[in-house]
Amino acid sequence: MEDDLKTSMQDIGKKARQAALELAVSSGENRSRAITLMKEKLASIKDVLFKANREDLKEAEADGLEGPMLKRLTINEKVFNYVLSRLTALATLDDPLGRVLEGFTRPDGLHVERISVPIGVIAVIYESRPNVTPDAASVCIKSGNAVILRGGSESLRTNIVLADALREAVTEAGLPANAVQMVRTNDREAVTHLLKMDQFIDVIIPRGGKGLIRKIAGGTNIPVIKHYEGICHLYLAEDAPMDWALDLSVNSKCQSIEVCNALETLLVDAGAADRLLPELSKRFRDKGVELRGCAETLKILMDAVPATEEDWRTEYLAPILSVKVVNGLAEAVRHINTYGSGHTDGIVTKSLDKARRFVEGVDSASVMVNASTRLSGGGDYGLGAVVGISTDKIHARGPVGPMNLTSYKWVAYGQGHLRE
Amino acid sequence: MEDDLKTSMQDIGKKARQAALELAVSSGENRSRAITLMKEKLASIKDVLFKANREDLKEAEADGLEGPMLKRLTINEKVFNYVLSRLTALATLDDPLGRVLEGFTRPDGLHVERISVPIGVIAVIYESRPNVTPDAASVCIKSGNAVILRGGSESLRTNIVLADALREAVTEAGLPANAVQMVRTNDREAVTHLLKMDQFIDVIIPRGGKGLIRKIAGGTNIPVIKHYEGICHLYLAEDAPMDWALDLSVNSKCQSIEVCNALETLLVDAGAADRLLPELSKRFRDKGVELRGCAETLKILMDAVPATEEDWRTEYLAPILSVKVVNGLAEAVRHINTYGSGHTDGIVTKSLDKARRFVEGVDSASVMVNASTRLSGGGDYGLGAVVGISTDKIHARGPVGPMNLTSYKWVAYGQGHLRE
C-alpha cells in the first residue's frame, strides 16, 4: 500500500518532467490559448463545480470546520467570477518566456543577452482555498512550467472537478495533459513523497498556515518559495490628510478581512493622534471592527481594548485592529521591521521626504505610499494572476505571477571570440 | 568545547545580521569605495599574502595534495593580478541596489516600481581556491550583503591574511567590519552549525566538489545556490568554418584546463567530421591533449583512445577531451541535455537557423554561439567579479555577480488608491 503510493507519486513526477520538456519548446500562442480554454471550460462546468463545492462544504461543516476556514473553502459567484477574470487577464498578457531581460555588446564585440526560460516542474501544496487550483495551474502554464497540485483534503471534490477541466483545456490547446496534475488522494504520505522527489520537482510553493510552510521547508532538498503570513501595517504620518487616512485605513482593513494583505496594525504618528484617532474609531465602529490600542491610544480612545505585546505579532484575519501611537517615522519603521512579516506595509503622507525614508527603511515585499495595502496583489501589479504572495527574498518576492516563475539563460553571440 | 564552537558561530551570525541591516541603508558610494580600498589593501600586503600562501602550499604538499588541487590552492602573480583587476572592474560598476527593475503606471493611476535591494546575509562555503575570498567578499559588499566566509582547511593561512585586509578596507570605507567575517577554525563542525543558522543566514553558496555541494544542500533549511560541475560541450555544425572550429575548440579546452567552463566534450557533425577531425587532432596533439573518441571518431582518428559511456559524463579538468560524431543538430542538443551539466555549451555555425535552434534547445545557463566556452564568466558578461557560476535555475543562473545577489521590493505610489 505504502509502496503503491510511492510508485504513483513517482509516476506523477516523471510525467511532470516529461511535460515540462514539451512545455519548454511550446509556443506562447498555445500556452495563451490554454488559458482562454481554461476560462471557457470552467464557465461551462459552473454547476457541477458549485455542486462539488457544496458537498465539500457540507462534509467540512459536519467535521466541525467554521468561520474563516469555511469561508476560504467556499467557491461562490464572487470567487468564481474573480477566478475567471484573472484567466482573462492572464490570457492577454505577453509571453513571459523568451523575453530579453537585458542585452548588451561588450567592448570586444561579444553580444550577450539574458533570456527568460521556464523553471521546469513546480509543486504547489496548499490548504483549503480551492481557487488556488486554477490560479496556480494557469500561472504555471503561462510561464511554461509543469505543475503538480496538492490541495487541502477538505476540498478534494472541488479540486478534482477543477483539475479535470483545466487538463481538458491544456490538451485542447495542444499541450501535454500532464502539464497539470492533481494528487487525487488525501493520504498525508503523498506530501512526504513529493518532498523527496528532487529529481522531478524544481521548486515547491506551499500555501497555507505557518506550520505547514515551516514543515515543508524543513523537510526537503527542493527549493521552497515561502508564503508566510501578512502582518501588515499602515503608518499615518503627522501630515496625513484626514480623508486618505480614513479611507485607506478602512479599505486596507475591511475590503476583505481574511486575506494576507489586509491591515492588522495601524500606526498613528503622535503628532496626528488627537486629530485622527477619534474619527478612525468612529469609522471602524461602524464597520464592526474592534480596536486594541497601546497606552497612548487608550488616552484618546478610552473605549478601546488594551493591546498586549502579543497583539503586535498577530495576524488576526478577523475584525480586530491593533493601534499604536508612534513618535515619528523612524519609530514606525522600527516597529514594522521588528513586528511585521515583510509582506505589505504602507504610509499615508504628502511629504516627499517622509515617503522616500519610509520606502527605503521598510524591509517588506510591498511598500505602499498613499495606497491601500489590499493593492499589493498580482492583479494590481499587472501580473494577471498569481500563485501567491511570497515573503521570501530568494527568487520571488511579493506577488508571484508568471514572470516570477521563470529562470533565464545567458546567450553570447561571438565571431570566433576567444578568451585571452 | 562543542558548545564554545556553537556559541562563537552564533555570534558570527548575529554580527552578520546586524552588519546587513547597516549595509542595507549604506550608500553605493561607500560600498564602491570599500572595493577600491580592498584592491589597495591587497596590493599593499602582497608579500605577506604570498608568504602565507607558500606556507599553506608547503603543508598541503606534505599532506600529499598534488596536481590540480595544489594548483587551485596557489596564489601566484597571475591569480593575484586577476583578483585585483576584478576589484577594479567591480568598483566602477553602477550600484546594483536601488535599480528600478521595472516600473509602470496602472490604468487606475497606481504607479508601481520594482526596486533592487540586498538579500541580507550570505554564507560562502568553499574548498581550496583562496581567490574566492576576495571575489565573494567584494561581490557581497558591492551588493550590500553581509558575508560569512568559510574556506578550505588547506588555505586557512592565506584566507586569514586576505580576510584581515578585506575587513580593514570595509571599515575604512565607513561600513561595519562584520560585513565580512571569516570562520577562523578548521573544525568541520563549524559548517554543521552554519547550516542550522537560518535565523541569521539568508542564502548559502557552496563552491567545491559535487559531494560538498550535495551534502550542504541536503543538510539545511537555508536556500542554497548550487554551483555544480561543468561538463561543457562545443558542437561543430556541418557548416562550421575550419578556423573558428579549430580556434574555438582549442581555446575552450586549453585556455585554462581545470576550470568549470573549460570544454570536456567536442561534438562534431557527421557532415563535417572528415573535414575537421584530422586538423583538430593535430592541434590537440600539439597541446598535449588526449582525445577519447566514439566509434565514428575512431574510424577517422585511428590513434584516438576509445571513449566509454562514462567519458560523456566526466568533467576531466585535465588535458583529456572526449569527441563524439553526431548526426545533425537535434542529436547534438539531445546529447548535451542528457549528458551535460547545464553549465556552458556552444555551437560553431554560420547558419542563423542552426544558431536559433541550438540556443532554444539547449537547457544550459550559458549558450555560446561562435564564442569560446571560456567566455561564460562574469567578467565577460560585464558583471565585474562573481561568487561563482550557478547551475541552479532558482534565483541565480550562470555567473553570480553583484546584481544576481539582490532581491527586490515592490513600491506602489497612489493618491488615496483603494481596492474596489
Image: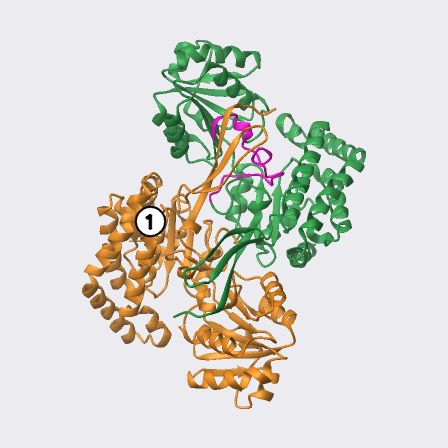
Chain colours: A green, B orange
Residue B256 picture location, percent across and down: 40, 73
Residue B306 seen in the figure: no
Q: Residue at x 46, y 18 (%)?
A: A292
Going by the image, does A71 lie left or right of B390?
A: right
Residue under label 1: B141
The residue located at (42%, 21%) in the rendering is: A350
Residue B73: % across, % down: 32, 69
Q: Is residue B88 above or below residue A272?
A: below
Is B127 on the left or on the right of B373, as rendered? left
Q: Does A420 sit above or below residue A313? A: below
Residue A357 seen in the figure: yes
- Structural crowding at the residue carrying mark 1, measured as other residues with C-alpha within 10 Å and reported as few (<14), some (14–19) or many (≥20): many
Above or below for B38 versus B175? below
Describe the element under mark 1 as helix, strand or loop: helix
Q: Which residues are magenta?
A: A368-393
Q: Position of residue A228 (x, y in %)?
A: 52, 37
Name the kind of residue labelled 1 in the image: Ile
On screen, residue B47 versus residue B8, left or right, reads left
Pick whichever, B298 or B271, lies toward us.
B271
Up-down: is A408 above or below B317?
Answer: above
Using the image as rendered, state which of residue A198 and residue B378 is in the foreground: B378
Corner quadrant of residue B355? bottom right
Q: Quadrant of the C terminus of chain A?
A: bottom left
**Residue B109 location in percent, x, y?**
55, 28
Whether A378 is among the magenta residues is yes
Q: Nearer the viewer, residue B199 or A271?
A: A271
Q: Chain of mark 1?
A: B
